[in-house]
Amino acid sequence: MFDTLSDRLQGALGDLRKRGTLDEEAISRAMREIRLALLEADVNLDVVKEFTAKVRERALGQDVLKSVTPGQQVVKIVHEELTSLLGGGSSRIVFASKQPTVVLLAGLQGSGKTSTAAKLALHLRREKRQPALVAADLQRPAAIEQLEQLGRQIEVPVYSAERSDPVAAVRDGLARAATDERDLVILDTAGRTNVDEALMDELARVRDVARPHNVLLVLDAMTGQEAVRVAEAFQERVAFDGVILTKLDGDARGGAALSVRAVTGKPVKYVSVGEKVEQLEEFHPDRMASRILGMGDVVSLVEKAEQALEEDEQQAMEARLRKGQFTFDDFLSAQRMLRKMGPLQGVLKLIPGIGSQLKDVEIDERELKRVEAIVLSMTPQERALPKLIDGKRRLRIARGSGTNVQQVNRLMDARKEMEKMMRGMSKGKMPTFPGMTPELPAGPARAVPRSSKRKKKKRSRR
């Protein structure tokens, strides 16, 4: 997500960070690089011009040029303007005082409305809502069946009795939702391959019957500026309150996300970052700006971790970590939590300073399964008391997990290092990530024992 744009912007700002002083020429050179990076990301030309003009004007101010760290001040300005461009503060959907709240999803065919409807239902159910889905897309073959299948997967009811008239389908769905005491109804409407009169007329009739509290436009982020043009067309005929961007995990260059708010004035409310039903996130402009500039996103990382662990697991692990303890049961819980949080490479990029270091490192996620197999080959006593695991036990564990003793040894060392880091954090020390450098080879990193370092130092003295 935004990888190319992120690399270009960080490269443009990297030189400024290193400079002790700044002049107009250095700032102009950086602005040219930023302008090219945004244009290559398919950002609207007028938006690019306005953005770079604002950054340049603020960067040339006396407060920046006379600052002790002028380069960092420019980075701060870019972050603030990027946040503003993306929409400023986060924007959530509006919930009605009188139930149910109605959310209408609109968009072109192929934008991902049906899967987005299920993702949104699951996301809001986690916020203690009682959602229901209404199948009002009667044009696309198998659209109703797809929504019903997704509804069963996430355990949310789908109202799909009416198969001929979308207006009647919506009316019937809302009535059934009221009877079932559902406090949230999401309408999956029909799309077309292009914006046409028939689509708009149908949407207008559905909207008039449903009287939605939120109309969300679903846009395919991979279409770039075409998505912005679609948003403008919908804005003229069917007023919408916000945008959901899909396929942001693909080769999306970021142009739609960076342009749609500035062009339409409507905020991006959610982004889809994968095909799985749980891969829908609220859009936070400040966090996204931080990710783009390589600053990480600690808040989102914590939220993902909280969702991946049950509350009682969180409390139990937190209590042990406060004592500086980290058993193999904790190690296993952490591994499973990471896998629930999404692709490991994406999760690690949320950690400030780690994303840029991992740029050239390929992480083999199959290693997580090997680690889990090793831990599950241990007895409950061995997992709770790792010091019991001697040479014979390591051999047995390796055979039971289909690995070798060297891999078991590496895991033992990794647990020790993790425990040391946790003890340090319990004393208020920030964790360090030794070895996480671009020169790392593919595959899991091996820690160099301290004893070997000492031997090297002794030899060098001789």
Image: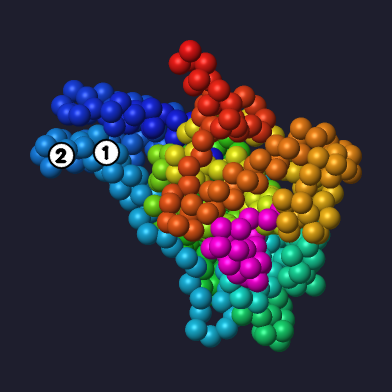
Question: Which is nearer the eye, 352 or 444?
Answer: 444
Q: How many marks?
A: 2
Q: Residue furthest top?
A: 462
Residue shown at the point (60%, 40%) measured from the top left: 345
Local crowd size for mark 2, using a 10 Å CA cut-off: few (<14), some (14–19), many (≥20): some
Relative vertical location of residue 418 with respect to residue 65 in this rendering, above or below: below
Stretch of the chain drawn in magenta: 307-328
| Residue type beneath disc 1 | Gln
Horizontal placement of 355 versus 401: left or right? left
Dominant SS of magenta comes to: helix
Identify the element where label 2 is drawn: loop
Question: Which is nearer the eye, 273 or 396?
Answer: 396
Horizontal placement of 162 versus 326: left or right? right
315 falls in the magenta region = yes
Dot 2 and dot 1 residues touching (CB under 8 Å): yes
Identify the element where label 1 is drawn: helix
Residue shown at the point (69%, 69%) measured from the top left: 133
On the image, the x and y values in percent for residue 284 come to 44, 55
Which mark, by number, is residue 67? 2
How does the figure colour the protein chain or chains? rainbow
Q: Quadrant of residue 220?
A: top right
Residue shown at the point (43%, 51%) measured from the top left: 429
On the image, the x and y values in percent for residue 355 come to 50, 38
Q: Quadrant of residue 161?
A: bottom right
Q: Quadrant of residue 222?
A: top right
Horizontal placement of 382 versus 130: left or right? right
Which mark, by number, is residue 72? 1
Q: Residue furthest front?
A: 462
Relative vertical location of residue 332 with respect to residue 94 in this rendering, above or below: above
Horizontal placement of 147 versus 338: left or right? right
Between the C-alphas of marks 2 and 1, the distance is 9 Å
